[in-house]
Image (cartoon, helix red, strand yellow):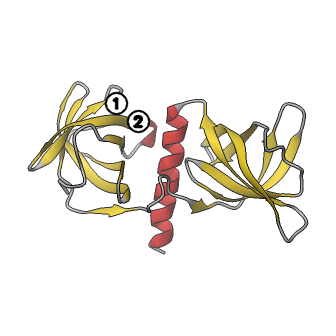
């Protein structure tokens, strides 16, 4: 594990109540764990309570469960996890996500069917003519109580065999909290799908 975590590495920490998700930077790696300096006060993160951790490495997104052995303000000492896994090599975990949604621009609403999403962007199909220069607002339902609203910018538009278009593009977020929620949602769904 020590070869996967290094000083200055950025990390997302998600307690069981993920509205208290937080970000931090590794400040020290020790034989039995590492020190993490959080960006925000550690609300909802309790000593000895397991949390999920996500970080980027040269091998892909690293995921593991661990807990804070000590909490001193925004500084946490995290126990070395017993095991870890790589979610996938791309920067963000991509999952199948099939829903009929509205893509909103200043002057019109386009009907789209999403195919897949990640925290970086999405792919969808549509019969509407999408402007590759446009910026669109979209609301992504994650559960009955939770949505993420973000901006979508098309990067690639291809004609598909159904007389419509397949569009790929990237997200821009109003808040880093929304990006964190979508990152965690995709990672969790990816693990659920693999375990089916």
Q: Of 104 and 166, which appears nearest the observer?
A: 166
Name the residue beneath numbered marker 1. Answer: 43
Q: Of 78 and 7, which appears nearest the observer?
A: 7
Residue 102: which numbered mark, if any?
none
Question: Considering only order in the chain, which callout, 1 or 2, is on the residue closer to the N terminus?
Answer: 2
User: Could you tell whether 103 is left or right of 98 in the image?
Assistant: right
Residue 20: which numbered mark, if any?
2
Toward which corner of the image does residue 99 lie, by quadrant?
Answer: bottom right
In the image, residue 15 lies at what x, y percent? 36, 43
Query: Does dot 1 land on a helix, a strand or a loop?
Result: loop
Image quarter (top left, top right, bottom left or bottom right) of the N terminus: bottom left
Q: Name the residue located 87 percent from the left edge and 41 percent from the top edge.
A: 109
User: Could you tell whether 72 is left or right of 88 in the image?
Assistant: left
Toward which corner of the image does residue 138 lie, by quadrant?
Answer: top right
Labels 2 & 1 near each other (Cβ < 8 A): yes
Q: Name the residue located 21 percent from the left edge and 39 percent from the top edge.
A: 47
In the image, residue 69 lies at what x, y percent? 15, 42
Q: 10 Å neighbourhood of mark 2: few (<14), some, or many (≥20)?
A: some
Q: Residue furthest bottom?
A: 196
Q: Name the residue located 74 percent from the left edge and 57 percent from the top edge.
A: 124
In the image, residue 68 lies at what x, y percent? 21, 42
Q: Name the residue located 15 percent from the left edge and 47 percent from the top edge.
A: 33
Q: Residue furthest left?
A: 31
Q: Of 92 and 50, which appears nearest the observer?
A: 92
In the image, residue 83 lies at what x, y percent? 24, 63
Measured Cα–Cα span from mark 2 to mark 1:
6 Å
User: Could you tell whether 141 is left or right of 124 in the image?
Assistant: left
Q: 10 Å neighbourhood of mark 1: few (<14), some, or many (≥20)?
A: few
Toward which corner of the image does residue 82 lie, by quadrant?
Answer: bottom left
């Amino acid at each position: 594990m020590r070869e996967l975590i290094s000083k200055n590495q950025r990390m997302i920490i998600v307690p069981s109540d993920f509205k208290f998700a937080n970000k931090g930077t590794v400040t020290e790696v020790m034989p039995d764990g590492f020190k993490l300096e959080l960006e925000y006060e550690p609300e909802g993160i309790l000593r000895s309570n397991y949390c999920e951790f996500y970080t980027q490495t040269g091998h892909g997104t690293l995921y593991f469960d661990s807990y804070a052995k000590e909490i001193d303000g925004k500084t946490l000492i995290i126990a070395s996890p017993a095991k870890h896994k790589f979610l996938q090599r791309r920067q963000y975990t991509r999952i199948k996500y099939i829903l009929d949604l509205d893509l909103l621009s200043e002057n019109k609403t386009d009907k789209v069917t999403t195919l897949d999403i990640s925290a970086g962007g999405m792919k969808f199909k549509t019969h509407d003519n999408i402007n590759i220069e446009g910026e669109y607002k979209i609301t992504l339902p994650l559960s009955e109580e939770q949505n993420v609203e973000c901006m979508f910018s098309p990067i690639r538009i291809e004609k598909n065999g159904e007389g419509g278009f397949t569009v790929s593009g990237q997200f821009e977020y109003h808040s880093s909290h929304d990006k964190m929620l979508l990152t965690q949602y995709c990672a969790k769904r990816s693990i659920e799908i693999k375990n089916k």
